[in-house]
């Protein structure tokens, strides 16, 4: 069923409200999550010499912004949740843009890499082609996009107060390739467990020119 403008506005409003209401507990619960495997996957595919300009899309409270900055890069955060924007600015000292994923206003060819860790699954599937084109456009030529999403069977809907779309590898590939990306690698997380215990699909893509 096609979502209309009112549906999309409700999805954005309620999903962001969920994060706003739980911002402090979310920060406490995710503060020590180890995503070093994902950060390394993005950085190893970026061409050219560091420091790199990186967009942390859906940066949340700023945990990974701090990591990128500590590694000597020039990260910029983006989040739609007001409390997260304030928390990320305070925690990292980085520039953090307050934008939601369905109304991105991004500068052209600005970033070497985009780190989209556990965020793009909140974009309804019908809107993903447009959002992915926006992300491609803000990457420099041959720039790199990292994404990690909870995987599924290409279904979507409400889950505990948040909207989510749960793609399998083939479905995700189709969307990314149609938006002008070429696949560099993919893997499942957490590392080292049987596949049925790896709910996250991580993938790395290069802007194709």
Image (cartoon, helix red, strand yellow):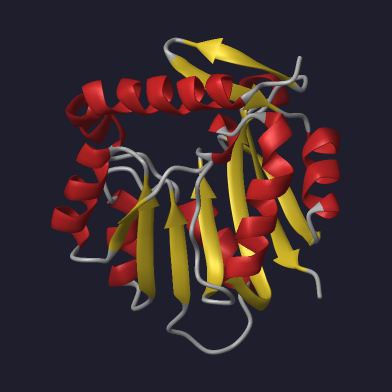
Q: Quick check: 174 left or right of 53?
A: right
Q: Position of residue 182 (x, y in %)?
A: 81, 61
Let me know if residue 45 appears in the view: yes
Across and down, in percent, residue 36 comes to 45, 54
* Residue that lies at the very extreme toward the bottom in this rendered image: 49
| Rendered position, 192 above or below 47 | above
The answer to whether 126 is drawn above or below residue 148 in the figure is: above
Judge by depth and name the residue closer to the eye, 58 or 191.
58
Residue 102 relative to residue 188: left or right: left
Kindly identify the residue that appears in the image at 50 percent across and 43 percent down. Answer: 101
Q: Which residue is more in the foreground, 128 or 38? A: 128
Q: Position of residue 187 (x, y in %)?
A: 69, 44
- Quarter of the image for residue 44 reads bottom right
Is 20 situated left or right of 129 in this image? left
Residue nearest the observer in this picture, 189 or 28:
28
* Residue at (72, 59) in percent of width and height: 205
Q: Which quadrant, please, contains the N terminus?
A: top right
Q: Locate the C terminus by quadrant.
A: bottom right
Q: How many marks?
A: 0
Say above or below: 113 vs 121. Answer: below
Give the vertical position of 113 relative to 58 (above or below).
Answer: below
**Residue 11: image location, x then y, percent:** 50, 22
| Residue 22 appears in the rendering | no
Q: Does residue 30 appear left or right of residue 43 in this picture? A: left
Residue depicted at 60% across the width and 48% down the height: 147
- Farthest residue toward the front? 5
């Amino acid at each position: 069923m096609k979502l209309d403008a009112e549906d999309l506005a409700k999805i954005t409003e309620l999903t962001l409200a969920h994060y706003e209401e739980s911002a402090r507990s979310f920060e406490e619960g995710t503060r020590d999550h180890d995503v070093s495997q994902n950060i390394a996957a993005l950085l190893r595919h970026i061409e050219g010499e560091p420091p790199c300009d990186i967009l942390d899309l859906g940066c949340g409270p700023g945990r990974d912004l701090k990591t990128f900055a500590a590694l000597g890069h020039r990260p910029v955060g983006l989040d739609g949740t007001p409390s997260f924007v304030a928390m990320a600015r305070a925690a990292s000292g980085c520039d953090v843009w307050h934008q939601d994923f369905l109304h991105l206003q991004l500068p052209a060819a600005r970033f070497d890499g985009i780190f989209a860790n556990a965020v793009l699954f909140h974009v309804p599937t019908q809107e993903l082609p447009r959002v992915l084109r926006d992300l491609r456009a803000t990457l420099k030529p041959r720039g790199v996009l990292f994404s990690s999403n909870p995987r599924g069977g290409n279904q979507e809907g409400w889950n505990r107060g948040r909207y989510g779309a749960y793609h399998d590898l083939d479905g995700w590939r189709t969307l990314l390739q149609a938006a002008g990306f070429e696949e560099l690698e993919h893997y499942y997380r957490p590392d080292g467990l049987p596949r049925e215990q790896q709910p996250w699909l991580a993938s790395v893509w290069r802007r194709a020119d």
